[in-house]
Image: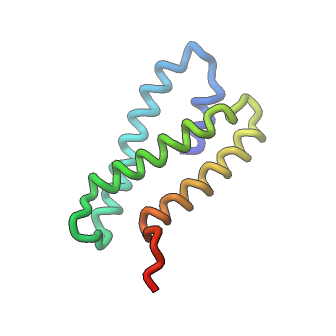
Amino acid sequence: YKLMLNGFYNSPKELKDELQKRYYELSKIGMGIIADIISKLPLKKGVSVDNVITVISGIQNILENKYLFYFTDDAASFESVYSMVTDEFMKLLNIVMYGIIDEK
């Protein structure tokens, strides 16, 4: 995923359409793998794998839009931004998985 994003954001403009298509195809494969993992988890009653995939996709889209302007041609810049994005993604994913209410 990291390699794909770096290639997408640091590629010539004339390749953007083709890369967007490939990005979509790879994202679809990635979500299929995530769906397989989620299907093995003990989901709460009324929560489907599709519901979880929708939330995860939403988080991913929000973060991509939030950090999009940080991506530059500088590889060091990409590394630092990618790290920020993955840290925030994992934090938000944990909130989704474990909730926001402390049930003590």
Looking at the image, which residue is at 73% across and 47% down?
80
User: Residue 20: image x %, image y %?
Assistant: 47, 26
Say which of 101 and 31 sits in front.
101
Quick check: 76 left or right of 92?
Answer: right
Residue 82 against residue 48 in the figure, above or below: above
Return the residue found at the far left.
Answer: 46
Q: Quadrant of residue 51?
A: bottom left
User: Residue 41: image x %, image y %?
Assistant: 32, 70
Tally of marks: 0
User: Residue 6: image x %, image y %?
Assistant: 62, 36
Looking at the image, which residue is at 74% across and 37% down?
75
Say which of 53 and 99 sits in front.
99
Quick check: 81 left or right of 48?
Answer: right
Looking at the image, which residue is at 37% across and 48% down?
31
Say which of 11 and 60 sits in front.
60
Say which of 100 and 53 sits in front.
100
- The colour style of the image is rainbow
Return the residue found at the far bottom.
Answer: 104
Looking at the image, which residue is at 67% across and 51% down?
83
User: Residue 68: image x %, image y %?
Assistant: 61, 34
Residue 89 against residue 70 in the figure, above or below: below
Quick check: 6 left or right of 17?
Answer: right
